[in-house]
């Protein structure tokens, strides 16, 4: 049979070789169907274009936030693991630096020996993902819920409010490669992180307790200063 | 036996290349002008996909295609890549914070730091694109088999794709909407197979992209 088609094709038509090939193809397809994703978030958060508030603010990033790893086993779709912690730290540092005239990283909500106006302390309350086969849509989706707290210099709570973020990525934009799950969920997560940064930067002064605190400060109500 | 096999493969390759390069796409472009336009050499445009409504969200490659086509050729206009613009204007053009109507523009352009940024990157027009490409029908059957004697397919498949996109053009300078361009395309692809499947692909999305980019370029550069 191999002689009829040509000498160069002979090794390909060896029954043992074909059987191995078909087995390997089956194994690869089976594994790729339920492999999940293991994502280490990387990238940069742009500097927000917002007016700076004339405040010296401490930024307390609790270990649970900085080391946060999301893990979920999705039936028939493998294990999904997202290392989000370091990227969250980068996000809040970048956004706080743009929001206030000074944002200093502190190691507790009541830092000693640093002259500050307040301490901002984000913590992660919930993290959820959905993949297209779960929602019967074309989208990978990520929801993050943070609890934002603002403390005064004595450690008293000024304000506490939820910051919800959402990101999605269209599976059609990632083709059918083995790593399309990883790329898509990474983009959805990055969009959600940027969404959190956007709403923190744009809505901070609209939180009623924050607004009241800003208005009640002994110095005249702070005027936003351009960057 | 080598020569006939080579001839057959060459013939099949040529058929495949011919099929892949051909297309059966019908495209319709419409334009609504609300104000006069024009663009100077130091001004540019940015093409953005709407991400607030999943049902009408455009594919990334369509946005990139329109963007690239607008900037190509001797009549091309200056185009800023979507990601670069969105990063530069962060957080004002994120999916949930981007302006939905021109009435939202003053909040952005009246802020000195944002106005300076827009001026420094030279954006004159923001083009918002909504819409996507869907498979509207499909039929036929094909079976393929692999054995020690070889592999082959037999059958016939066909499918129809439909593209529908609309671009809204905002003039940042005047803070108004200057018009809309819509591009609709449809086409049927088919793939007969007698041993080797030969795809005849109708490049519907590409057709819609080329038509839209061409019309947008005319719309923006034609001072009327």
Image (tube, rainbow, N blue to C red):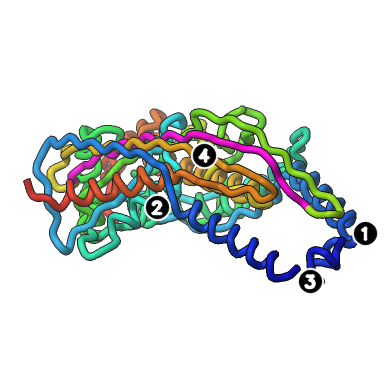
Secondary structure under tag 3 reads: helix
- Between disc 1 and disc 3, the foreground one is 3
- Between disc 4 and disc 1, the foreground one is 1
- A137 relative to B29 in the view: left or right: right
- B182 relative to A13 in the view: left or right: left
- Label 3 in the same subunit as label 4: yes
Mark 4 surroundings within 10 Å by alpha-carbon count, few (fewer than 14), some (14 through 19), many (20 or more): many
- Residue A145: name its quadrant: top right
Q: Do the numbered discs 3 and 4 sit on residues whose CB atoms are within 8 Å?
A: no
In depth, the one of B60 and B107 nearer the eye is B60
Q: Which mark is residue B64?
A: 2
Q: Which mark is residue B114?
A: none
Q: Do the numbered discs 1 and 3 sit on residues whose CB atoms are within 8 Å?
A: no
- Which chain is mark 3 on? A
Where does the N terminus of chain A fall, quadrant-wise?
bottom right
Between marks 2 and 3, how big is the CA–CA gap? Answer: 43 Å
Residue B59 on the magenta segment: no
Residue marked by disc 3: A8
Q: Which residues are magenta?
A: B151-171
**Residue drawn at x 17%, y 46% as measured from the top left:** B219
**Looking at the picture, does residue A110 appear above or below residue A20?**
above
Residue B220, percent from left and from top: 17, 49
Name the N-terminal-most of marks 3 and 4.
Answer: 3
Residue A96, percent from left and from top: 44, 50
**Residue drawn at x 46%, y 32% as measured from the top left:** B54
- Which chain is mark 4 on? A
- Label 1 in the same subunit as label 3: yes
- A75 relative to A123 in the view: left or right: right
Mark 2 surroundings within 10 Å by alpha-carbon count, few (fewer than 14), some (14 through 19), many (20 or more): some
Where does the C terminus of chain A fall, quadrant-wise?
bottom left
């Amino acid at each position: 049979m191999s002689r009829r088609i040509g000498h160069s094709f002979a090794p390909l038509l060896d029954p043992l070789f074909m059987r191995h090939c078909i087995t390997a193809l089956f194994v690869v397809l089976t594994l790729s169907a339920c492999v999940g994703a293991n994502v280490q978030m990387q990238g940069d958060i742009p500097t927000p274009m917002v007016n700076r508030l004339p405040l010296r603010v401490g930024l307390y990033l609790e270990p649970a936030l900085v080391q946060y790893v999301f893990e979920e086993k999705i039936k028939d779709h493998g294990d999904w693991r997202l290392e989000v912690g370091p990227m969250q730290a980068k996000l809040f540092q970048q956004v706080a630096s743009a929001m206030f005239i000074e944002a200093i990283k502190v190691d507790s909500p009541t830092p000693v020996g640093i002259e500050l106006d307040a301490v901002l302390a984000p913590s992660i309350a919930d993290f959820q993902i959905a993949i297209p086969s779960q929602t019967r849509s074309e989208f990978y989706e990520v929801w993050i819920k943070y609890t934002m707290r603002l403390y005064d210099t004595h450690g008293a709570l000024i304000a506490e409010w939820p910051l919800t973020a959402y990101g999605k990525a269209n599976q059609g934009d990632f083709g059918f490669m083995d790593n399309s799950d990883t790329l898509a969920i990474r983009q959805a997560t990055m969009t959600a992180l940027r969404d959190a940064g956007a709403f923190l930067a744009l809505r901070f002064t609209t939180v009623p307790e924050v607004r009241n605190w800003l208005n009640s400060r002994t110095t005249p109500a702070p005027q936003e200063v351009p960057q | 036996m080598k020569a006939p096999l080579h001839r057959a493969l060459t013939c099949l390759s040529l058929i495949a290349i011919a099929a892949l390069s051909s297309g059966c796409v019908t495209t319709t472009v419409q334009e609504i002008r609300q104000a006069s336009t024009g663009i100077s050499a130091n001004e540019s445009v940015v093409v953005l996909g709407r991400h607030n409504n999943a049902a009408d969200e455009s594919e990334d490659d369509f946005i990139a295609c329109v963007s690239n086509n607008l900037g190509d050729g001797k009549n091309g206009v200056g185009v800023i890549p979507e990601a670069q613009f969105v990063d530069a204007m962060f957080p004002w053009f994120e999916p949930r914070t981007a302006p939905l109507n021109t009435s939202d523009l003053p909040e952005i352009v009246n802020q000195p730091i944002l106005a300076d940024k827009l001026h420094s990157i030279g954006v004159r027009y923001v083009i918002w694109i909504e819409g996507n490409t869907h498979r509207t029908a499909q039929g036929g059957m094909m079976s393929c088999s692999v054995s020690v004697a070889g592999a082959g397919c037999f059958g016939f498949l066909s499918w129809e794709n439909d593209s529908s996109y609309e671009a809204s053009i905002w003039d940042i300078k005047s803070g108004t909407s200057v018009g809309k361009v819509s591009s609709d395309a449809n086409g049927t692809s088919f793939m007969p197979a007698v041993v080797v499947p030969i795809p005849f692909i109708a490049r519907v999305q590409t057709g819609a992209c080329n038509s839209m980019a061409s019309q947008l370029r005319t719309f923006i550069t034609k001072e009327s």
